[in-house]
Image (tube, helix red, strand yellow):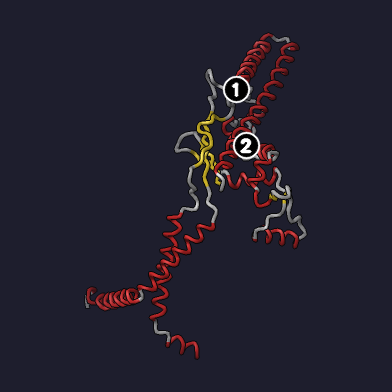
Amino acid sequence: MSLDTDLIGPLGEVQKLLRNGVKIALAGRRLVLGVTVLSAVCAVLALRQIEPVFTATLVVGPTAAGGLLGRAAPLPAIPPGSETSTIPGAGETMSNYERFLYEVTSFPVAEELAAAPEIMHRAFEPMWDADAGSWVPDDSPVARLRRFFNELVGRIPWTEPDGRTLVRYLQKEVRVQQVGTTPLRRIIYRHADPEFARLLLNRLYATTERQLRSMAVRDNGRMIGEISRKITVTQDLGHVEALRSLLISHERFAMMMDVDLPLAANLIQPAMAEAVPDTPDPVVVVAIAAAAGFVAGLCLVFIRSADLSEFVKAAGR
């Protein structure tokens, strides 16, 4: 017997099964259509109950590290062959831009922002009672369940939001994405209020830049004072010339900081948000609901048309 002859039987059974399935589906098309429409309507009603979310974006880029516009703080190089140069990581450096990208969701930045009521009240709106003017525990089911388990194991069930709470919120909600293959970074934050989303991103940028600038200016001033002191007590002329060269570079950096220019990151695009919410997407949600309803309707039709007598007899045994 040839292979083609062997396949005729199974293929015929499959074709027969498909024809029967199509007939059953066509016979129950009203039920399938009804479940599909009902699912789409439920999705629309659910979308009307869900608060839409707006996406705000802010784009930053690195500042010039050298040249006439170079604003990198001068640091002494590690002498080759020194003991510290053999320590793993001793020769690694972090640019001001890399430091900015790390600090934007760090605790020092969050701690400063936590002092602003307009930030805290909107970021943790479920816990702010505007009428009483005080913080209250979140009344959502998940928050209540978390407080219950904390009390069950003897932990503090709830505390008022502070800088520690805000830094966890920022690290969870704020995302930093690379723009293509460029060094630019897109900082993204989503919130139901587009104006607050823009406000938070702009505050994050300004606070992080100001903190890094203040640290650089303070440390550079200390270096200038120490180098100036060393020059007055050093007797070796070669050392004095090297110290004066180093002092000039630090004084140049100090003069650059007198100009109101960003130190760590240039603001390429201020925070902006679309005029319409982008999450959740109504088209995608309704399409998925309709597809799920169509499948559920087909299942109901096939279950209704199936002969369940054998299953009932088997269950009775």
User: Residue at left 62%, top 34%?
Assistant: 89
Q: What amino acid is at disc 1? A: Asp
Q: Compared to 50, does 187 lie above or below?
A: above
Give the class, few, some or many, for how many residues have Cα within 10 Å of label 2's Cα (few <14, many ≥20).
Answer: many
Residue 94: x, y in percent?
A: 59, 32
Mark 1 touches mark 2? (CB < 8 Å): no
Single out the mark in the foreground, 1 or 2: 1
| The label number, if any, that marks residue 196 in the structure image | none
Q: What amino acid is at disc 2? A: Glu
On the picture, is 57 further left or further right than 139?
A: left
User: Residue at left 66%, top 45%?
Assistant: 121
Secondary structure type for disc 2: helix
Q: In the rendered picture of this protein, how many numbered marks are placed on residues? A: 2
Instruction: Report which quarter residue 167 is drawn in.
Output: top right
Q: Compared to 250, does 110 lie above or below?
A: below
Does the image show residue 49?
A: yes
Does the image show residue 79?
A: no
Residue 174: x, y in percent?
A: 57, 44
- Front-most of residues 216 and 208: 208
Q: Compared to 172, does 88 lie above or below?
A: above
Instruction: Report which quarter residue 23 is drawn in.
Output: bottom left
- Front-most of residues 152 and 225: 152
- Residue under pointer 1: 260
Residue 160: x, y in percent?
A: 73, 49
User: Mark 1 to mark 2: distance in Å?
Assistant: 20 Å
Name which of mark 1 and mark 2 comes first in the sequence: 2
Instruction: Report which quarter residue 8 is drawn in.
Output: bottom left
Residue that protrudes farthest toward the right in the picture:
154
Residue 73: x, y in percent?
A: 62, 23
Give the class, few, some or many, for how many residues have Cα within 10 Å of label 1's Cα (few <14, many ≥20).
Answer: few
- Residue under pointer 2: 103
